Image (cartoon, coloured by chain):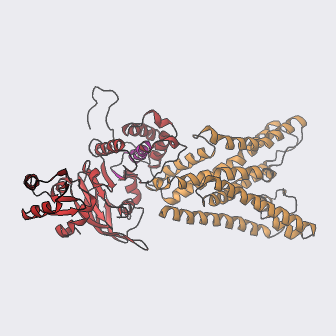
Amino acid sequence: MSEPTGVIHDIGYRHYGGARLGRGHATAALLVHSLRGIFGLGRTARAKIVPFLIVGVMMLPAVVSIAIMALLKQPGMTYTSYGVTMQAVLAIFLAAQSPYIVAPDLRFRVLPLYLSRPVTLWDYVGAKLAAMIVAMFLLLAVPLTVLYVGELVIDLEGPPHTGGYLTSMAGAAVYAILLACLGVAIASFTPRRGLGVASVIAFYLLTSAVSTIVSATMDSVNNYTASGWALMINPFFLVDAAVQVGLFDAAPSAPVAYPDGTSVVLQLLIVAVLIALSVIALIMRYRKAAAR
Amino acid sequence: MTILATEGLTRHFPRVTALDQLTVTVGPGVTGLVGANGAGKSTLIKILLGLLAPSAGSAQVLGMNAMTQGAEIRRVVGYMPEHDCLPPDLSATEFTVHMGQMSGLPRTAARERAADVLRHVGLYEERYRVMGGYSTGMKQRVKLAQALVHDPRLVFLDEPTNGLDPQGRDEMLGLIRRIGTEFGISVLVTSHLLGELERVCDHVIVIDGGKLLRSSSIADFTQTTQTVTVEVEEGQEALADRLTELGESVTRHGRMLLVHVRAPETFDTLRDVVCDLNLCLVRMEQGRQRIEDVFKEPVDREPADV
């Protein structure tokens, strides 16, 4: 290599002698990069509008509840009903942001660049999925935590609802995993972002409409088991019934009663199967994309 | 020193054989890989990166086995794909930093390297703008930068001059030459234009239909297959006959005659014959080595290579 000459900005090519970290570091870097991208950080101002708007809307019930507790000295919203109440907002966020996670890399063919680096295809898919899971979890866990901190600070009569808070955090984790897997799997099938957004939102509208209609019909003919199961078509009620109500005994947040008794195992199994199917679909999709 | 070596490398796809018993060795410096579309260039690069398993044979890159040590190879090798691969909503800087991190550089080091490398490929103020608005030339530069950001020991450049205007092409070729010499990074560059590679490569490998046609240093290449193209208004036949009589080898190519240059005297003979026959000479130019020429002749000339 040539020595620096009189010209200050032509110092020639410098070799890199520093650390070269492994796959783990690269995967973590991809996770952070994707997570920032989901919230529009490091992207254009326009990309920040939707995620920030949704985060704001998600915070609203927590803020209002804290205000109610502070001013009216009455208990605010229950923790475990947060996810179900805000399901439309969560679904919009999922629909708006999960295509961002997968579509551009497929559409603009960035994937081969990742694959030409030490990370494997499964590191890539794992990091992308993990980023979406973390984003969904934060979206739900941050308002819940704010609400809990608010409750502790205001210190109403009686013990704080620590149990309810922890249950809702477990629920948030399962919500995040299930929704992110479903959303990313659906979105990965099209390289077009708009189509991805439409598919995910259509999936939510369809499941929620079908479950509401069927369960209301069954309820009106007094078939309560069927109406409870019909509700399970909607992933939000499924997680509420399986995890928050089934495992942790929280109060159900649904218009009709959940199917009772031994069905918890079955519900948990459905959650697991849905996650597994989504992951398998993703793997198949990416195996095909990588071969191109 | 051997940078990469393949031994009987074969890859079958369901309907085509992309590589067929390919055995080559590549030393340091700039090596050109020439072949028509579908000749197996991209398949070869994928195998060398350890992304595709060969059906038979073996490949070594920087002394590592491409089949079993793919991840280690990809750590110290850079790859610039042929196709567009840039997300339009990121700036060149952010993208290059991210790609540096993906190659294992810590974040601060990736930042420094990205700034360095983008300057070397000739992107200055525009590197802070989103890439969606870049020209083809700028995109090619960013693609090159991301292949160099982790200071690889070897880079694979797949058709780096694709879509560039003549000036951009010259600049890109100059850059490739610098990477091989000044940067000290070995380069394997593919193209379907041999003439272009002649200017930057030390060594050229020609493949067709997955088979090796020729592998030799650039000096051999231009010497052995020099031709001169002659165009006359009329009397093409007479000229060809007369030249053949005088012991020159002549091939007819449409309205042109391709005359093989055995020695500098061929030019004299040619001049004399044209004068003697009183022909109207339209042009006479040094034959740019074209890929078809190589495809035609070397089979009987260097059977050992095939």
Q: Which quarter of the rendering shows the N terminus of chain A? A: top left
Q: Is residue B1 left or right of residue A67?
A: left
x, y percent for residue B179: 31, 44
**Residue extending farthest bottom:** B14
Front-lying residue, B25 or A61:
B25
Q: Which image quadrant for residue A142? A: top right
Q: Is residue B211 left or right of residue B218?
A: right
x, y percent for residue B181: 26, 44
Q: Over which residues does the magenta segment extend? A: B138-156
Q: Is residue A246 above or below residue B281?
A: below
In this orientation, does residue A243 appear?
no
Q: Is residue B96 left or right of residue B41?
A: right
Q: Is residue B73 left or right of residue A140?
A: left
Front-lying residue, B148 or A152:
B148
The count of marks equals 0
Q: Give the letter of the red chain.
A: B
Q: Which image quadrant for residue A7? A: top left
x, y percent for residue B267: 10, 52
Q: Is residue B267 magenta?
A: no
Look at the image and give the colour of chain A.
orange
Front-lying residue, A53 or B265:
B265
Residue at image x 73%, y 40%? A56
Residue at image x 32%, y 43%? B170
x, y percent for residue A27: 51, 52
Q: Is residue B48 above or below residue B108?
A: below
Residue at image x 36%, y 38%? B120
Q: Which image quadrant for residue A40? A: top right
In this orientation, does residue A103 appear?
yes
